[in-house]
Image: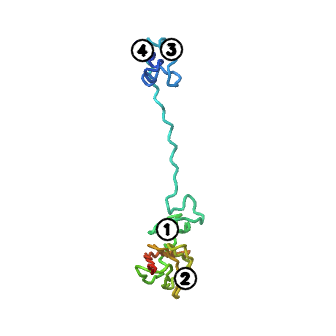
Amino acid sequence: MTVDELTVSVAISLGIFSASSCEVADVNGDNEVSIDEILLAVNRALDGCEPIATPTSSPTPAATSTPAPGSCGFACDGRACEGICPDGSPRLGSCSGNDTEGCRCELFECPVSCGITLDALPATWDKLSITLTGTLPFVGYQQIYASIEGGVEPVPVTFTPFHPYSVEVTLTPGLNHLRIVARASGPPGCHSEIDADILVVLPTPEV
């Protein structure tokens, strides 16, 4: 350690410099240089400052193989598998090994549209309730359960194929963003969302 380095060590001890000015002087790593550490520095003056040890990085754990989305994993035992449909919804299936490719995920068909229609609504309305009407063609289900959202509170609805529907929805003054959300389990299942905006402008009471 040189005379300059000894001077820096004393300055660190007095609080003039930080311990990072000569890290080897801070033997115990407490960001301070004590009298004992200064004496040790004097004893090492002939050898100079020792090089700062470079931290060794921990070995990176070996990556483990994980099944890709839609795969069967590492066993072909009839378990369920899952993929993604174009609309982002899960596409379920089952693992099978009945071909030359071995274990694979045989996906069911993706959900289709439930086919629900909504008759046209007026752009503005002067009442706090409105009746929604429309139809449901046959889509392979005896009933389809849905919810109409966006009014005062959600309204549960059961649609029956080949039958027109009529549902009253309570509105709030101002703009109402109505949405019909219908789903049926599969496979293949169906999923429909219909949006409609209606502005409620109540008549001004006569004075």
Give amino acid for label 2.
Answer: Phe
**Residue contact at pointers 1 and 4, CB within 8 angstroms:** no
- Taking depth in this image into account, of 14 and 181 the one nearest to the observer is 14
Quarter of the picture holding the C terminus: bottom left
Q: What element carries label 3?
A: helix
Q: Can residue 189 be seen in this view?
A: no
Q: Name the residue under label 2.
A: 159
Q: Is mark 4 on a helix, strand or loop?
A: helix
- Residue 180 appears at what percent x and percent y? 49, 76
Q: Name the residue under label 3.
A: 40
Identity of the residue drawn at 59% across and 66% down: 78
Q: Mark 4 points at which residue?
A: 7
Q: How far apart are marks 1 and 3 (CA)?
A: 69 Å
Residue 141 found in image quarter:
bottom right
Q: Name the residue under label 1.
A: 89
Disc 3 crowd rating (10 Å Cα; few below 14, some 14-19, many 20+) is: few
N-term-proximal mark, 4 vs 2: 4
N-term-proximal mark, 1 vs 3: 3
Of tags 1 and 4, the one toward the viewer is: 4
In the picture, measured across the screen, residue 96 lies left or right of residue 175, that is right
Disc 2 crowd rating (10 Å Cα; few below 14, some 14-19, many 20+) is: many
Tell me if residue 206 comes above or below residue 54 in the rendering.
below
